[in-house]
């Protein structure tokens, strides 16, 4: 972004706050980018000839006579096949030492898909993790976050899901990733030999927090290129959306907006929806699937960020440590995939819906038995058996280290039913029980 | 000559326009940005400055851009052809838009100009008519669609002539009326009406009393809703608000169903697009889509248009009610609408009320619910709008402004319960927490006595008591163990 000779240079800044500067200028468009002493900034407010700019890198050290030039466009990304295998910062500049990407210049944060031109999602995404594939099956074109406390291994799970998902392209949008996590992703993708189908946009904790705001739009702009122009199935990983929302609240606070719940801006729902609704199944075959991470504070899903997210996304995957087996599991009660009924029992084996529901019901019985035990009541034989079942179920199916095909998950389910219960206790349709109940 | 102005300030989708002549509150204007015209609505005027909310992205807009005022408020176009359409919040026909992505500043005509309709006259020459009088009817899908004297006409008119039965386009003149001064006025099948103003061309609005069967047993039995009634469904995410609304819209015995998808997921709307053309209306045997209109203003579409979308839906419903039809209107979710109000109030730097919502939120919600209802038309026929809105309370906590404001005005409350949803029991309506005020209406009791029997409502009340007792007993067992159940 070099300054062209004929561009007007402004040098009189009238106001400086922690994140914004104001100056007098004319002929400037809303959302337009500018350079303030070489730092990238964006127009956020115009009032007569007074322009307010949000400086992405922060305003530390900016003098009142800083040189300000307007670039004449909003943030853009050069899209082409050459994006594949590359790592970029939040502005779309390479950080892997490679050359600038040549391609068509596209404004990020583009228009929405016409709802009547969408297709109903119908392609199953297999991840090998039974807590997902069996209970909360993912479908291409879906948007779903992991709700997880910061101490859970969500980056590892995401990386696994991404690699097993058989997507044509994986786009990583990292917001406030630590440098260690960034290097972890890079290494995992490299080791899997998958680098050529990965594009990354990363704003690590080394960068100013406001730069995170550009990352999802950059990632989704690249995703739209591959999904629309190339009809590819694209998986977008966004981690961590809580840190993205934090940046929104920083900016709105600096602009003196009245906060709503939990100090978040009143527009949080719309801001998040704009990102998540980019998930789509196109009629021509391409798709964008979004898997995000929303870190929680002590499992609290009523905080404004997870709460608004839950109203937007098509379900959520809830990670927690199961103390019975000492492993992290995908919680079958609090997790939900709203699109699973579009594929289960149809794209998967006929017994899938019934096995899934029976197992969760029995797991709930075990939870009740556990409460009973903790309160000092006597356990019945059924209670004991459901507790044993729950332990096996957690270990063999819910744990995130499971990696098997869906048919095998269903067989495991039947084996556990046979091991702990009588046929009539599982409340599954007679004909399915006869067909699948394990011998002996 | 229409009023014009120049852009003076821009803060996201709030634009300040310096105007050269008179403007009205809520007047529509268009901001010229290169080749596109961005539609906006005046929401505040101070001196020569009009504050307008833009229904589109304002990216690239510059100070000094020209603004043209349209001279009318935000209005919908009414006429045959609304059924089966998929509109956005401003009544643009989404199917007429080219390309996969929505283009900024693209507005499409909501009706079909070339389609021929089978017209049959109702009014005769010499009759005296007024606004909303029926002049004739056409067959819209399978519904009789009345062509009415436009709602904006004032005073009485004499019918000079009505077109003979035959095929006409919506733009063809189908009647000539003579006003009180003796001037001829031509009427075609199209009329316009501002969305924020209720269509009140009826004789009176009695208390509703007829049961509206929704097809959802727990509602129809324990907490019934009536024709022209209002209800709301609050619930945390994942408890099945949308699925319940879709269920009701499939089964309910309404003539017409209007669904306003207001700031919700696009894939849910796609589900309606995919399913409704296939599903059969259980009452008429026709395809569901033939009696349905969808207003899709999904969460990623501009926020100001989201606010307009519920009004657009309500105005379409009022238009059909004036034809003597039974309309079911569903809005999902009214919380997103309230949030749109909050975003604008915030940009206008108004002093905030609870949770940063505007102070008049309660009044806005009350006025909106009041537009539903059962009415007797001037010609003695009846029509109704039954309105059911969902509410998405933040954090599932019902003590928040939108839920509380809605609770004051809606007569039915269908409470969705997280624990029912967790154990995959849908619809997750809690029969004890939910209520229907209509059970207390003597008019309703009389109607039910005639239709079912006079013991029905006492039995429902007894069932409710038993459910309540059952809950108490099970709580007692949880604390004291199974053996304690006997002492109750």
Image: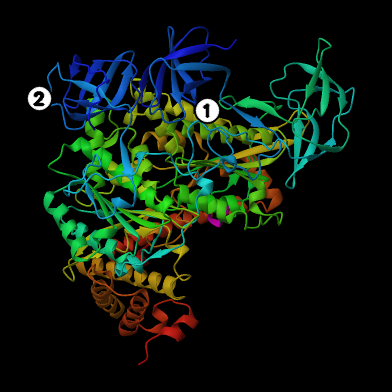
Distance from label 2 to label 1 (Cα)?
A: 53 Å
Is B4 above or below relative to B460?
above
x, y (%) of residue B482? Answer: 32, 69
Report the residue marked by disc 2. A61
Is residue A391 or residue B488 the one in the foreground?
Answer: A391
Question: Is any part of residue A267 visible from this angle?
Answer: yes
Is B126 above or below relative to A126?
above
Q: Left or right: where does residue B39 sit relative to residue A18?
A: right
Residue A254 colored in magenta in the image:
no
Question: Could you tell me which chain the residue with mark 1 belongs to?
Answer: B
Q: Kindly indicate whether the residues beneath marks 2 and 1 are on one polypeptide chain.
A: no
Task: Give the magenta-colored segment's residue range.
Answer: B217-222
Q: Left or right: where does residue B477 sit relative to residue B147?
A: left
x, y (%) of residue B303? Answer: 43, 33
Is residue B475 or residue B29 the one in the foreground?
Answer: B29
Q: Quadrant of the N terminus of chain B?
A: top right
Q: Left or right: where does residue B8 sit relative to residue A86?
A: right
Q: Residue furthest left?
A: A61
Q: Secondary structure at mark 1?
A: helix
Quarter of the image where one finds residue B131? top right
Residue plotted at (17% across, 66% down): A323
Magenta segment's dominant SS is helix
Residue B218 colored in magenta in the image:
yes
Residue plotted at (30% across, 84% down): A419
Report the residue marked by disc 1. B367
Number of marks in picture: 2
Residue plotted at (49% across, 82% down): A431
Of the two numbered discs 2 and 1 in the rendering, the one whose residue sits closer to the viewer = 2
């Amino acid at each position: 972004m070099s300054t062209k000779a004929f561009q007007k240079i402004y040098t009189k800044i009238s106001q400086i706050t922690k994140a914004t500067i104001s100056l007098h200028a004319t002929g400037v468009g809303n959302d337009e980018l500018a350079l303030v002493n070489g730092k990238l900034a964006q127009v956020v407010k115009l009032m007569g000839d007074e322009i307010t700019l949000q400086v992405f890198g922060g305003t530390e050290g900016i003098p009142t006579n800083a040189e300000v030039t307007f670039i004449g466009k909003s943030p853009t990304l050069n899209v082409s096949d050459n994006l594949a295998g590359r790592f970029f910062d939040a502005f779309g500049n390479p950080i892997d030492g490679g050359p600038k990407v040549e391609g068509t210049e596209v404004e990020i944060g583009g228009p929405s898909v016409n709802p009547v031109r969408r297709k109903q999602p119908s392609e199953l995404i297999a991840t090998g993790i039974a807590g997902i594939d069996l209970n909360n099956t993912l479908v291409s074109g879906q948007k779903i976050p992991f709700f997880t406390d910061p101490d859970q291994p969500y980056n590892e799970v995401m990386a696994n899901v991404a690699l097993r998902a058989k997507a044509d392209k994986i786009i990583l949008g990292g917001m406030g990733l630590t440098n260690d996590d960034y290097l972890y992703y890079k290494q995992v993708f490299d080791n899997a030999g998958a680098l050529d189908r990965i594009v990354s946009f990363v704003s690590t904790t080394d960068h100013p927090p406001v730069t995170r705001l550009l990352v999802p739009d950059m990632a989704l702009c690249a995703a739209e290129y591959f999904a629309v122009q190339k009809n590819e199935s694209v998986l977008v990983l966004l981690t961590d959306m809580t840190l993205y929302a934090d940046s929104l609240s920083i900016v709105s606070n600096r602009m003196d907006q009245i906060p709503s719940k939990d100090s978040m801006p009143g527009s949080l729902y719309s801001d998040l929806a704009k990102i998540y609704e980019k998930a789509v199944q196109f009629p021509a075959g391409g798709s964008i699937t979004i898997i995000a991470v929303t870190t929680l504070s002590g499992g609290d899903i009523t905080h404004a960020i997870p709460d608004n997210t839950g109203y937007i996304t098509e379900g959520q995957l809830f990670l927690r440590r199961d103390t019975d087996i000492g492993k992290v599991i995908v919680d079958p009660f609090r997790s939900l995939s709203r699109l699973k009924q579009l594929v289960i029992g149809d794209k998967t084996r006929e017994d899938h819906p019934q096995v899934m529901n029976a197992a969760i019901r029995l797991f709930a019985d075990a939870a009740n038995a556990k409460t009973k035990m903790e309160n000092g009541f006597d356990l019945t034989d059924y209670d004991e058996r459901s507790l044993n079942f729950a332990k096996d179920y957690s270990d063999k199916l819910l744990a995130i280290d499971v990696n098997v095909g869906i048919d095998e998950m269903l067989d495991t389910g039947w084996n556990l039913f046979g091991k702990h219960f009588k046929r009539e206790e599982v409340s599954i349709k007679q004909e399915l029980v006869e067909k699948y109940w394990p011998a002996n | 000559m229409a009023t014009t102005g120049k852009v003076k300030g821009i803060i996201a989708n709030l634009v300040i326009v310096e105007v050269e002549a008179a403007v009205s509150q809520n007047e529509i204007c268009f901001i010229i940005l290169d080749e596109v015209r961005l539609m906006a609505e005046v929401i505040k005027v101070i001196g020569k400055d009009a504050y307008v909310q833009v229904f589109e992205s304002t990216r690239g807009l510059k100070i000094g851009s020209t603004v043209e005022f349209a001279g009318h408020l935000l209005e919908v176009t009414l006429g045959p052809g609304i059924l089966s359409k998929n509109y956005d919040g401003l009544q643009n026909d989404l199917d007429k838009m080219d390309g996969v992505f929505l283009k900024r500043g693209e507005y499409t005509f909501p009706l079909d100009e070339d389609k021929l309709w089978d017209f049959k006259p109702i009014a005769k020459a010499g009759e005296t008519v007024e606004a909303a009088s029926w002049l004739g009817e056409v067959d819209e899908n399978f519904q009789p669609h009345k062509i009415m004297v436009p709602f904006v006409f004032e005073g009485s008119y004499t019918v000079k002539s009505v077109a003979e039965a035959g095929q006409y386009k919506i733009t063809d003149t189908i009647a000539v009326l003579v006003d009180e001064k003796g001037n001829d006025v031509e009427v075609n099948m199209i009329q316009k009406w501002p969305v924020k103003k209720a269509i009140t061309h009826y004789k009176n609005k009695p208390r509703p009393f007829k049961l509206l069967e929704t097809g959802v047993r727990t509602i129809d039995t324990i907490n019934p809703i009536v024709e022209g009634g209002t209800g709301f469904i609050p619930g945390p995410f994942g408890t099945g608000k949308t699925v319940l609304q879709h269920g009701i819209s499939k089964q309910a015995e309404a003539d017409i169903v209007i669904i306003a998808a207001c700031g919700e997921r696009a894939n849910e709307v796609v589900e309606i697009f995919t399913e409704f053309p296939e599903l059969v209306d259980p009452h008429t045997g026709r395809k569901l889509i033939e009696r349905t209109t969808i207003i899709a203003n999904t969460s990623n579409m501009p926020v100001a248009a989201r606010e307009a979308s519920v009004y657009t839906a309500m105005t379409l419903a009022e238009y059909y009610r004036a034809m003597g039809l039974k309309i079911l209107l569903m809005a999902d979710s009214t919380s997103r609408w309230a949030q749109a109000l909050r975003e604008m109030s915030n940009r206008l730097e108004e002093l905030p009320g609870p949770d940063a919502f505007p102070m008049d939120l309660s009044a806005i919600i009350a006025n909106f619910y009041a537009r539903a209802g059962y009415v007797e038309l001037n010609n003695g026929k009846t029509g109704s709008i039954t309105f059911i809105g969902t509410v998405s309370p933040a954090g599932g906590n019902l003590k928040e402004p939108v839920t509380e404001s809605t609770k004051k005005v809606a007569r039915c409350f269908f409470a969705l319960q997280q624990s029912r949803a967790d154990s995959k029991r849908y619809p997750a309506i809690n029969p004890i927490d939910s209520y229907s005020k209509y059970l207390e209406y003597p008019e309703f009791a009389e109607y039910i006595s005639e239709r079912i029997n006079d013991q029905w409502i006492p039995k429902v009340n007894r069932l409710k008591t038993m459910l309540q007792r059952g809950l108490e007993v099970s709580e007692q067992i949880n604390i004291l163990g199974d053996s304690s159940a006997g002492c109750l």
